[in-house]
């Protein structure tokens, strides 16, 4: 299995690059942000609980997101591999993911970190907010999401660095240029 973590701050292009990776490598896409938004669209209890947290730009509890990922892995045991998009976002989530994969004698193959500076992130997310009306793409929430990333999520990069699995990719440039660099990294471990 090829198990890939796509990592980076909000607006770094994780969702965008995931689509292209899936197209080329046929992996199962697990985006915790998409799953949570799906729950919200279906007005489930979980979705309504998550909405308040997401609207503030805070992280949904580890217990909830780990449970969501556990169910998805279980439901896709025969996959060629997974792309984890927006997960793990805390070191506790990263450890739980290693333990979950271990139950299937699997592990993370590669972590790709999309490197984009704050000013560009804010610009991209404000643009998406204007175009799609996504509730958490407003200036106040964006600023908080980036701060939450710096405080709670960036240690996850060190976690994968210590395992020798983290590869940094410049996330500035055209979507295709960035994808070429991402694909180069994947080809090296495939
Ligand atoms: P996510 O849905 O993961 O949202 P995101 O971080 O904003 O990234 P996304 O993938 O959508 O955007 P992308 O960078 O592709 O999370 C939303 C919320 O859900 C979190 O704040 C949190 O509350 C909750 N949540 C999710 N996972 C969680 C977890 N594991 N634990 C706890 N809580 C969790 O793209 C952004 C924009 O940039 C797009 O408009 C795109 O078109 C544009 N773009 C992309 N690449 C570009 C490029 N090269 N040049 C110019 N623009 C580009």
Image (cartoon, rainbow, N blue to C red):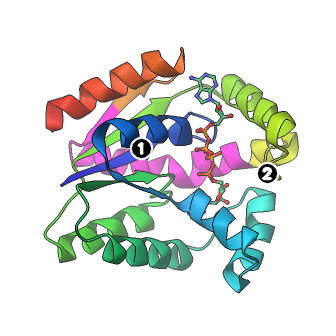
Q: Which residue is mark 2?
A: 136
Read off the magenta span. Answer: 145-167
Instruction: Look at the numbered disc 2 and give the secondary structure of its residue.
Output: loop
Circle 1 packing at 10 Å, graded few (<14), some (14-19), many (20+), is many
Q: Residue at x 26, y 73 (%)?
A: 99
128 sits left or right of 95 in the view: right
Q: Are marks 2 and 1 in contact (CB under 8 Å)?
A: no
Residue 158 falls inside the magenta stretch: yes
Packing grade of label 2 (10 A; few <14, some 14-19, many >=20) is some
Q: Earlier in the sequence, mark 2 or mark 1?
A: 1
What percent of the width, then of the height, locates residue 134? 80, 48
Residue 142 placed where, x, y %?
77, 43
Tell me: residue 8, above or below residue 39.
above
Whether 176 is drawn above or below 126: the answer is above
Is residue 50 visible from the viewing direction of this image? no
Quadrant of the displayed image that contains ligand 1: top right
Residue 140 relative to residue 87: left or right: right
Quadrant of residue 35 within the rendered picture: bottom right
Depth check: 122 or 180 in front? 180
Q: Quick one: 19 or 58, which is closer to the camera? A: 19
Q: Toward which corner of the image does residue 30 lie, by quadrant?
A: bottom left
Residue at the image point whose x is 60% and y is 58% from the top: 33
Residue visible at 60% across and 48% down in the picture: 149
Q: Secondary structure at mark 1?
A: strand
Which of the numbered marks, if any, corresponds to residue 70?
none
Residue 166 visible in the snapshot: yes
Prevailing secondary structure class for the magenta stretch in the rendered image: helix
Q: Which residue is mark 1?
A: 6
């Amino acid at each position: 299995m090829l198990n890939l973590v796509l990592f980076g701050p909000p607006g770094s292009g994780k969702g965008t690059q995931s689509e292209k990776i899936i197209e080329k490598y046929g992996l199962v896409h697990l985006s915790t942000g998409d799953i949570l938004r799906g729950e919200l669209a279906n007005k489930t209890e979980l979705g309504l609980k998550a909405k308040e947290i997401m609207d503030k730009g805070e992280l949904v509890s580890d217990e909830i997101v780990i449970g969501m990922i556990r169910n998805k892995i279980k439901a896709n045991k025969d996959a060629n591999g997974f792309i984890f998009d927006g997960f793990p976002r805390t070191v506790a989530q990263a450890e739980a993911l290693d333990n979950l994969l271990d139950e299937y004698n699997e592990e993370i193959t590669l972590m790709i970190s999309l490197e984009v500076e704050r000013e560009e992130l804010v610009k991209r997310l404000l643009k998406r907010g204007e175009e799609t009306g996504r509730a958490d793409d407003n200036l106040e929430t964006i600023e908080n999401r980036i701060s939450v990333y710096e405080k709670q999520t960036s240690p996850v990069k060190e976690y994968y660095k210590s395992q020798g699995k983290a590869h940094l990719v410049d996330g500035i440039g055209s979507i295709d240029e960035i994808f070429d660099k991402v694909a180069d990294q994947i080809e090296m471990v495939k």
